[in-house]
Amino acid sequence: MCTRIFNNFNSKNEHLTTARNMDWATQMATTIFAFRVDPDDPMVKSGTPLESDHSLIWTARYSSIVTMAGTEAPFGASDGINSEGLVANLLYDSNATYERKDGSSCKNLDILRWVQFVLDTCCSVDEVVKTFSKDAPVQIQILGGKVPGTEKAASLHLAVSDKFGDSAIIEVKNGNFIIYHNSEFRVMTNEPSYSKQIELNQYWRWQWNSKNNFPSNTLPGGPFPSDRFARASYYLNHLYETTSNADSLAQSKSVVMNASVPVNFQSDNPNFPNIAQTLWTSVACHNNLTYYFCNSRCLGDIWMDLSKADEFPSAVSKLVVVSENTNKEYINHELYGYQNTNFKETVDPFAAVALTV
């Protein structure tokens, strides 16, 4: 599932945007949360649904807007931006394995809370990379078991990008963090491993190169992860330098839309969600802290402004964008335009209860 691109073609690190598609075989209930940090009333959060001495506990340092799977607990944070302009995107990774040999000495972090932890505690890609260094005493676990509202295991990897033009991809193999840290790593899909994606992309880069006088292949148009990676990379690497935030947002949305999969797409093998319809697209602007959400089943887009966090009704508030009724039917809400003032007060789904720091 999913494609992520980072549009950082700007020599002054201005007008930087990150876009991603959320692809999944079936409809998914979805809620957008807004978290507003108040130094006088700290948000203490837990890395696991059931707290223990091994749960990772942290205090949020930054405000954030986060898109989550689900409309009621358990929620799964998949995507968002924080008040420092850091963006985190969680994508499906069928090759991920999470158990560590030294896991008993680590603090546990449910993979469905990984994005929230990063956005709460890190201000840059460099800080994220340091947090999940080789000897990081943190163990990612699939404690929630499945992606909320689905029957699929939450097997995932993380992409982060920031207002400094930096980018990193973090995979987890046998509980160890494998980090690809480079501003050139602008595109991410699902499989194979990111090292293999980079290797395969070199072939396509040669096909597009002006020095290649005998190109033998056209740009792949299929829905498979390697096809979407090549297509997104091709278009992203053929853009002119952005001149405004609006320009960058439009570029990023159009590129990631070129890697989307049509609504109600039926794969030859529906058991693999990494070949599935695009449910929604998000586009985040690192420089002005705006976050756009584009529901594939609605004609309009909605957007939020984190620089105006005081407009949200409470420290923790939410906006349901896709809900599920008693008949298990999904309702895609026809929302349009600016939404800060339409959020509703709620409770923190990841709040620490039993323990304090």
Image (spheres, rainbow, N blue to C red):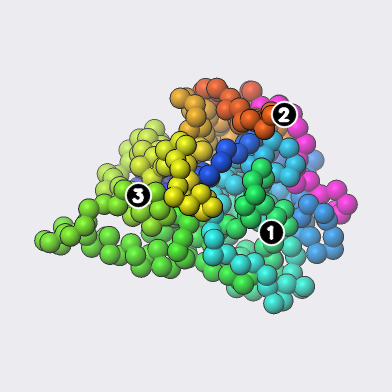
- Sequence-first disc among 2 and 3: 3
Q: Residue furthest bottom?
A: 101
Q: Nearer the viewer, mark 2 or mark 1?
A: 2
Q: Residue at the spot x=53%, y=30% of the render?
A: 303
What range is drawn magenta here? 343-356
Up-down relation of residue 112 to residue 302 (above or below): below
Q: Residue furthest left?
A: 213
Density class for disc 3 (Cα within 10 Å; few <14, some 14-19, many ≥20) is some
Density class for disc 1 (Cα within 10 Å; few <14, some 14-19, many ≥20) is many
Pointer 3 with pointer 1, Cβ within 8 A: no
| Percent x, y of residue 119 | 62, 49
Which secondary structure lies at badge 1?
loop
Q: Amino acid at mark 1?
A: Ile
Q: Residue at the spot x=78%, y=46% of the render?
A: 351
Decide if residue 174 is on the left or right side of residue 164.
right
Give the residue pinned by disc 1: 142
Decide if residue 211 is on the left or right side of residue 54.
left
Pick whichever, 56 or 217, lies toward us.
217
Q: Which circle marks residue 326 in the picture?
A: 2
User: Is residue 290 magenta-colored?
Assistant: no
Q: Amino acid at mark 3?
A: Gly
- Sequence-first disc among 2 and 1: 1
Which secondary structure lies at badge 3?
loop
Up-down relation of residue 217 to residue 260 (above or below): below
Q: Amino acid at mark 2?
A: Thr
Image quarter in which the C terminus is found: bottom right
- The Cα–Cα distance between marks 3 and 1, rounded to whole angstroms, is 30 Å
Query: Is residue 121 visible in the rendered structure shown here?
Result: no
- The Cα–Cα distance between marks 2 and 3, rounded to whole angstroms, is 36 Å
